[in-house]
Image (cartoon, rainbow, N blue to C red):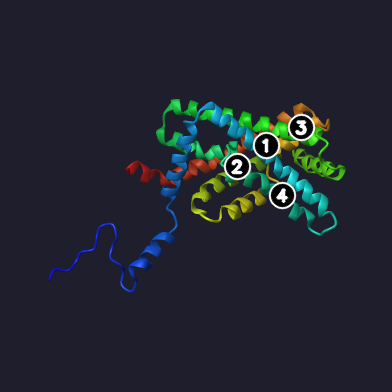
């Protein structure tokens, strides 16, 4: 009687392990870097091919949603005023807007500093660079319009109590206290962390809320600068007459934008590509 040979798609179990245990081992193996890269690259290609309208409305929604990071921090600062360590707890509110944006699959500019860059790096064609710049321009503009609308609501709607409005102003002034150099350096850290968050999500099945909260909470604790979330605060100070448009643009926006790009694209995306380049080239 001939022995049955195991099928090609289901290798025979190792000594001491049943087939079910082998399946468990396979399921619990961490994704290889190349697999994570391909997941993000494929998602980035889809984003690069999206039409203007889809990108614009999704980016606008993200700009509005991210405003809840500022509002949540203000709420916590207001209602926990007499509790020791309020600033540490208050920083948790920063995660709220990012949770809404990422779990709702809305377009956030700093996510695209990694997601949309990877396919361009693989293709190595100049025309794809223009496609990338188109995506960045649409999403960033839409994010900023959303941030402006949310900041205008905070400033002029009258929906906030006096205590909460004061807390929003305090949170916002803390951001603009940085010099342009500090904005840039802190922006590099924030750009790196957001790119790391994007890289971690494919492996975070079932724990996405925890991972998003952890990384964005770290950004808040470190006082790192994020060009979209910070725009709500900067616009609010400008609309309420606390800051000039010049300072909003050249002290906050430009240095922070460059820092986020440096951290998310120049550093994280390039290093991520470098670690999987050989495997990709072989294929």
Tell me if mark 2 has few (under 14), some (14-19) or many (20+) residues whose alpha carbon lies within 10 angstroms of its own. Answer: many
Q: Position of residue 256 (x, y in %)?
A: 66, 36
For marks 1 and 4, the one nearer the N-term is: 1
Residue located farthest toward the left when viewing the structure as drawn: 1
* Residue 119 percent coordinates (x, y): 44, 36
Secondary-structure class at tag 4: helix
User: Which residue position holds label 2?
Assistant: 191
Camera-nearest label, 1 or 4: 1
Could you say whether the residue bearing mark 2 is in a helix, strand or loop? helix
Comes first in the chain, label 2 or label 1: 1
Residue under label 1, please give it.
64
The answer to which of 137 and 273 lies nearer the viewer is 137
- Name the quadrant containing residue 162: top right
Q: Residue at x 71, y 46 (%)?
A: 223
* Position above or below: 67 against 200: above
Q: Secondary structure at mark 1?
A: helix
Provide residue 194's location: percent of width, then percent of height. Answer: 59, 45
Give the number of callouts. 4
Disc on the earlier residue, 1 or 3: 1
How far apart are the two marked residues, 2 and 4, measured between alpha carbons? 19 Å
Give percent across and percent down for residue 160: 82, 41
């Amino acid at each position: 009687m001939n022995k049955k040979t195991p099928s090609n798609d289901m290798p025979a179990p190792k000594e001491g392990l049943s087939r079910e245990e082998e399946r468990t081992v396979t399921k619990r193996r961490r994704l290889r870097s190349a697999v994570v890269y391909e997941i993000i690259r494929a998602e980035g290609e889809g984003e690069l091919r999206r039409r203007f309208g889809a990108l614009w409305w999704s980016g606008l929604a993200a700009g509005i949603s991210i405003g809840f990071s500022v509002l949540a921090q203000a709420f916590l600062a207001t209602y926990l005023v007499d509790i020791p360590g309020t600033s540490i707890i208050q920083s948790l509110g920063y995660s709220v807007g990012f949770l809404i944006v990422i779990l709702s699959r809305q377009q956030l500019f700093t996510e695209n500093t990694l997601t949309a860059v990877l396919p361009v790096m693989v293709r190595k064609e100049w025309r794809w660079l223009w496609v990338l710049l188109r995506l960045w321009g649409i999403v960033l503009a839409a994010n900023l319009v959303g941030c402006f609308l949310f900041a205008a609501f905070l400033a002029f709607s009258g929906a906030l109590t006096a205590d909460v409005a004061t807390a929003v102003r305090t949170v916002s002034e803390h951001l603009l206290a940085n010099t342009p150099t500090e904005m840039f350096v802190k922006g590099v850290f924030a750009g790196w962390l957001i790119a790391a968050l994007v890289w971690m999500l494919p492996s975070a099945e079932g724990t996405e809320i925890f991972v998003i909260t952890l990384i964005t909470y770290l950004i808040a604790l470190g006082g790192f600068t994020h060009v979209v979330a910070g725009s709500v605060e900067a616009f609010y100070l400008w609309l309420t007459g606390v800051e000039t448009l010049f300072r909003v643009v050249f002290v906050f926006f430009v240095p922070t934008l460059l820092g986020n790009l440096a951290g998310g694209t120049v550093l994280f995306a390039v290093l991520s590509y470098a670690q999987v380049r050989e495997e990709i080239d072989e294929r």
